[in-house]
């Protein structure tokens, strides 16, 4: 793969100015999304949402973990540009004890499937294409185990026709009296042929993972597996990354790779190439200050040696930014995406106390950190109307009504899910976006592991298509790019096999399906 060592940053306006703040309207009840992540200590972590189109109409649907209550499926009934609207349906995914939900097309039949992470046996659910799902553990040889599963990442290893799924497991759930030091092994489910999984391999040592992400951090063409771990419960542990070379057993990154020990209360991973050098940055959520990692300067091939630039970028988000509770924050789901369509990825962080921990903020508002042209972040969640102080866990940014603006979801412990519709900035220019979906024939149809680039003038946005990270939930569907005031842009895809497509013209306000060796195909909603 040709690497881009471009130092071109996004076009800086002549006069430095703060980003436009979008206005969000809380619409949960009106939109028909009524659901709570319930349960006591067994459900102190988790509470994720899968956002994906499970019935092929192009509108993103949601499956949301319920903890002690059943998981819930909401089918999107919005119309293009209309009010966000969902209908709760019976999908077959109404299992209890669900902590996390991730979408992926495991059997590459074109229908999105689900992995349900549970307190107890995990389940893979085959999607039938109409937002119904059927248990497939037996058909696909998937060992669900009997652990406290809290994290997931998936990839298609080179040469494989079936995905590899990593599952993070938390504290030994039978050790209630003295859980410290009783982290259980994470599992790696690799393919056995083209139609199922082999017996899982333990990823030892394991340190109570709460988020995992396959990411090609050094653009080698083979992703590593990042694991973010909760220091509250491990002994002698740290953050981790695994080499996962095709046909080889997993090997931990260590001193020789440049890896440095870092201990945090790791709860969520978000990644995005913020600096424009072609390599992703990683935001790691924790308690108190969060980390924003970037590669240390290097010549030639990068080492896995990261520095924390959260303070310099204004992204520590370590205590409540509003209200009078001055105790430190507790952060969970995190996601980079461009909520104001100015071409700069913003950062959404969902927050909430573990339960009633007295040393941490009880009223802990979520963050919406808008990226400025100089790469620093500006807290805007109060102005945007999304500074929820519910006990947050999972979340998502996704365009739920296909109007070209990213809407917002938060899943809350002991409280209702919140959905906010993005109505754009109250004043100032209305910026446009383009939405892209990948389509490969055969296997890995959604192109997980691809990189999408979108170019407007000298500015290039780059996005790695990953499946995992966040906190206990993931997304697979449209990929959103803000275009500021550009009416035209060019898009290019580096596919998972390393093939780089050509730059191709795309127009603002339009949706495209990108396929290998074909012109971008305009996609139009039927409603
Ligand atoms: Ca749909
Ligand atoms: Ca499928
Ligand atoms: Ca932005
Ligand atoms: Ca929208």
Image (spheres, helix red, strand yellow):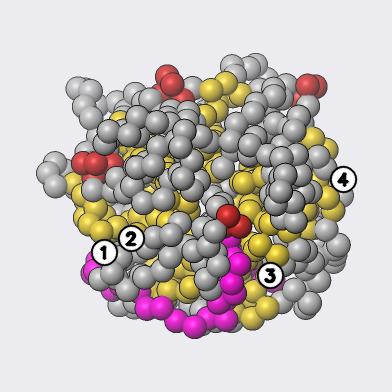
Q: Nearer the viewer, mark 3 or mark 4?
A: 3
Q: Nearer the viewer, residue 275 or 115?
A: 115
Q: Is residue 343 above or below residue 288?
A: below
Q: Secondary structure at mark 1?
A: loop
Marks 3 and 1, the one that precedes in the sequence: 1
Asked if residue 172 is among those painted magenta in the image, a careful observer would answer: no
The answer to whether the residues at label 2 and label 1 have Cβ atoms under 8 Å apart is: yes
Q: Residues within 10 Å of mark 1 (few under 14, many from 20)?
A: some
Q: Is residue 152 above or below residue 429?
A: below
In which quarter of the view is residue 443 placed?
Answer: bottom right
Residue 17, how many percent across, how many down? 21, 27
Question: CA separation, marks 3 and 4?
Answer: 24 Å
Question: CA separation, marks 2 and 3?
Answer: 27 Å
Point 37% across, 63% down: residue: 416
Point 43% across, 31% down: residue: 328
Q: Nearer the viewer, mark 2 or mark 4?
A: 2
Q: Is residue 13 visible?
A: yes
Point 40% across, 31% down: residue: 327
Residue 69, how many percent across, how many down? 52, 71
Q: What numbered label is drawn on residue 419?
A: 2
Quadrant assignment for the N terminus: top right
Segment colored magenta: 79-108
Find disc 3 in the rendering and name its residue. Answer: 123
Q: Residues within 10 Å of mark 2 (few under 14, many from 20)?
A: many
Residue 47, how many percent across, how many down? 51, 58
Question: CA separation, marks 3 and 1?
Answer: 31 Å
Find disc 4 in the rendering and name its residue. Answer: 249
Residue 346, how many percent across, how many down? 37, 39
Marks 2 and 3, the one that precedes in the sequence: 3
């Amino acid at each position: 793969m040709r690497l881009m060592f471009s130092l071109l940053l996004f076009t800086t306006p002549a006069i430095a100015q703060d980003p436009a703040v979008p206005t969000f309207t809380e619409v949960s009840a009106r939109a028909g999304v009524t659901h709570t992540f319930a349960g006591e200590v067994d459900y102190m972590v988790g509470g994720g949402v899968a956002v994906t189109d499970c019935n092929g109409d192009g509108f993103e649907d949601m499956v949301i973990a319920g903890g002690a209550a059943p998981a819930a499926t909401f089918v999107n009934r919005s119309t293009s540009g209309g009010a966000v609207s969902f209908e709760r349906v019976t999908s077959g995914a109404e299992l209890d004890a669900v902590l996390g939900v991730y979408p992926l097309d495991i059997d590459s039949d074109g229908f999105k499937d689900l992995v349900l992470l549970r307190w107890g046996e995990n389940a893979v659910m085959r999607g039938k294409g109409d937002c119904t799902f059927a248990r497939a553990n037996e058909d696909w040889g998937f060992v669900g185990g009997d652990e406290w599963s809290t994290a997931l990442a998936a990839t298609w290893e080179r040469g494989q026709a079936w995905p590899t799924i990593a599952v993070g497991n938390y504290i030994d759930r039978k050790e209630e009296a003295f859980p410290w030091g009783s982290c259980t092994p994470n599992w790696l489910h690799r393919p056995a042929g083209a139609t199922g999984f082999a017996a899982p391999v333990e990823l030892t040592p394991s340190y109570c993972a709460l988020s995992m992400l396959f990411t090609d951090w050094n653009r080698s063409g083979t992703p590593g597996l990042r694991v973010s771990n909760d220091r509250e419960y491990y002994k002698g542990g740290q953050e981790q990354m695994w080499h996962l070379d095709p046909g080889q057993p997993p090997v931990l990154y260590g001193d020789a790779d440049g890896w440095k020990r870092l201990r945090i209360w790791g709860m969520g991973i978000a990644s995005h190439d913020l600096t424009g050098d072609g390599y992703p940055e990683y935001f790691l959520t924790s308690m108190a200050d969060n980390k924003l990692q970037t590669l240390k300067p290097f010549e030639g091939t990068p080492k896995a040696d990261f520095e924390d630039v959260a303070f310099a970028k204004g992204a520590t988000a370590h205590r409540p930014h509003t209200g009078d509770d001055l105790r430190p924050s507790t952060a969970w789901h995190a996601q980079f995406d461009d909520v104001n369509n100015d071409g700069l990825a913003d950062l959404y962080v969902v927050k909430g106390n573990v339960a009633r921990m007295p040393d941490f903020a009880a009223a802990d508002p979520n963050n919406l950190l808008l990226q400025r042209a100089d790469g620093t972040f500006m807290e805007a969640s109060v102005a945007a109307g999304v500074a929820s102080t519910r006990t947050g866990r999972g979340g998502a940014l996704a365009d739920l009504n296909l109007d070209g603006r990213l809407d917002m979801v938060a899943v809350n412990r002991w409280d209702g899910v919140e959905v906010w519709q993005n109505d754009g900035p109250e004043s100032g220019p209305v910026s446009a976006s383009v939405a892209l979906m990948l389509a490969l024939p055969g296997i890995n149809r959604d192109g997980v592991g691809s990189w999408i680039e979108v170019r407007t003038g000298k500015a290039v946005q780059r996005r790695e298509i990953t499946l995992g990270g966040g906190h206990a939930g993931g997304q697979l569907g449209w990929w959103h790019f803000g275009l500021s005031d550009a009416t035209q842009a060019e898009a290019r895809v580096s596919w998972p096999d390393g093939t780089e497509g050509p730059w191709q013209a795309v127009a603002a306000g339009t949706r495209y399906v990108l396929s290998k060796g074909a012109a971008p195909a305009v996609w139009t909603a039927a409603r």
